[in-house]
Image (spheres, rainbow, N blue to C red):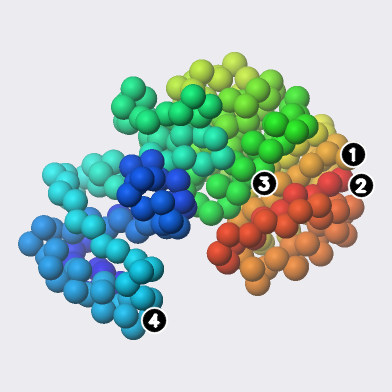
Amino acid sequence: MLETQGFGHAVAESTYAFGALASDAEHPQRESEVRTLCNSDLCDGIVQTVESWFQAWGLTESQWRIDLEPHFVDETDPEALWQASWRPFRCAGYVIHADFHPREGLPIRPDDIPLTIFAGSAFGTGGHATTRLALKVLTDWCKTDPPTRLLDVGTGSGILAVAAALRGVQEVVGMDPDLQSPPQAARTAEVNGVGAQCQFWRGGYETARGTWPAVMANLVADLLQDGARDLAQLVAPQGKLFAGGILDLHWQPTCDAFASRGLKLEQKLERGRWRAGIWIKS
């Protein structure tokens, strides 16, 4: 929308749930953040435009705020834009930050687990709603009934696989059809000191073998529905499957597909219009 209003091509958008480290004290009730990079000469115009949108959408002034921050970046360099807009944040006991954020500069609490994301093109920086739900599920699993082995289907950047290894899961494997995913995920594991516990390869869930006590599949609804049989075969008897990336209108068809393959819904999770769930193999 901002691009169509003539505010330039240098627009980067990220969404953070409550827990953004840089703003915990300033905005303790903030739920999300959209960051936009634009030319400093256009700041007044962009503020007026966004304010008019908020008013048209019926938002009160207590529901939003606009902050201006100076950034000196090369607008033709996508990596520079991404680095300028990416902030560390806290989720489910992890402090998630990019490899270009020095750990010594992070406000890490004694019980936090730093999780470094290696910058690359594969999906998964932890900012997506269902990735956050998955991280919370992982934390709960590892605290109450820690799995010894975990399979991460559609691993992307490897964030969930690495998060599991950091929680003590001794054998973690992940696969993804994206050519960029396995090397990026492997490097993420190495950066976090869990390379020996993790293995990654290129392929879909049909390339996995055996059964697993814990399976993560943070994909999209159509892939989950089409792959329900394969996913069910990968979950060990009484094992757990986390499936996310499901919009609300696709929730019931996904549940039906899983139920037809012997997967029983144990818990439904929600964040905005996104749905996720935990299923048990009967």
Residue position for label 2: 282
Q: x, y (%) of residue 105?
A: 31, 27
**Residue shown at 78% from the left, 32% from the top:** 145
Dot 1 or dot 2: first in sequence order is 1
Name the element at disc 4. loop
Q: Which of label 1 and label 4 is nearer to you? A: 4
Q: x, y (%) of residue 247?
A: 61, 65
* Left or right of residue 170: residue 115: left
The quadrant of the rendering that contains the N terminus is bottom left
Q: How many marks?
A: 4
Observer-nearest residue: 39 or 143?
Answer: 143
* Left or right of residue 53: residue 263: right
Q: Residues within 10 Å of mark 1 (few under 14, many from 20)?
A: some
Is any part of residue 145 visible from this angle?
A: yes
Name the element at disc 2. loop
Dot 1 or dot 3: first in sequence order is 3
Q: Which mark is residue 58?
A: 4
Q: Amino acid at mark 3?
A: Ala
Residue position for label 1: 237
**Residue shown at 61% from the left, 56% from the top:** 245
Cα distance between the residues tagged 1 and 2 = 6 Å
Q: Amino acid at mark 2?
A: Ser
Q: Kindly check if marks 2 and 4 are in contact, taking CB atoms under 8 A apart as contact.
A: no
Q: x, y (%) of residue 143?
A: 70, 31
Q: Which of label 2 and label 4 is nearer to you? A: 4
Residue position for label 3: 217
Name the element at disc 3. strand
Q: Amino acid at mark 4?
A: Gly
**Residue shown at 21% from the left, 45% from the top:** 77
